[in-house]
Image (cartoon, helix red, strand yellow):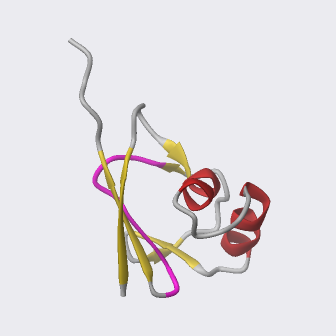
Amino acid sequence: MQKLEFQITGEFIELNNLLKVTGVCASGGAGKALVAAGMVFVDGAVELRKTCKIRAGQAVRVGDVRILVQGGAKAP
């Protein structure tokens, strides 16, 4: 299984955008199609919300790719 780490800079990233920026799919639209087809898992459960908010500490899996989302530095 391929493991990717993604560092978020804000509070969250939308699921379809996470799939795009990590290179799992070519576009946000392709990410939405993967989610709609039930092929995306968040923390082990199928996720059908295309713009689900993914936060630090969550894991996303698509096929044999696992994305671990890590938090960025907090502003003082």
Q: Residue at x 24, y 29 (%)?
A: 73
Answer above or below: position of 16 versus 1: above
Instruction: Tell me where residue 44 sits by quadrant.
Output: bottom left
- Nearest the eye: 36 or 9: 9
Q: Is residue 17 above or below residue 73?
A: below
Locate residue 58 relative to residue 64 in the image: left or right.
left
Q: Quadrant of the N terminus?
A: bottom left
Residue 58 on the magenta segment: yes
Residue in the foreground of this view, choosing between 25 and 47: 25
Q: Quadrant of the C terminus?
A: top left
Rendered location of residue 61, percent (x, y): 45, 75
| Residue 11 within the magenta-colored segment of the rendering | no
Q: Residue at x 39, y 41 (%)?
A: 8
* In the displayed structure image, the side of residue 1 where residue 28 appears, left or right: right
* Residue 25 % position (x, y): 66, 68
Q: Which residues are magenta?
A: 54-63
Q: Residue at x 52, y 60 (%)?
A: 22
Q: Position of residue 40 (x, y in %)?
A: 56, 75
- Residue 16 left/right relative to 66: right
The residue furthest top is: 76
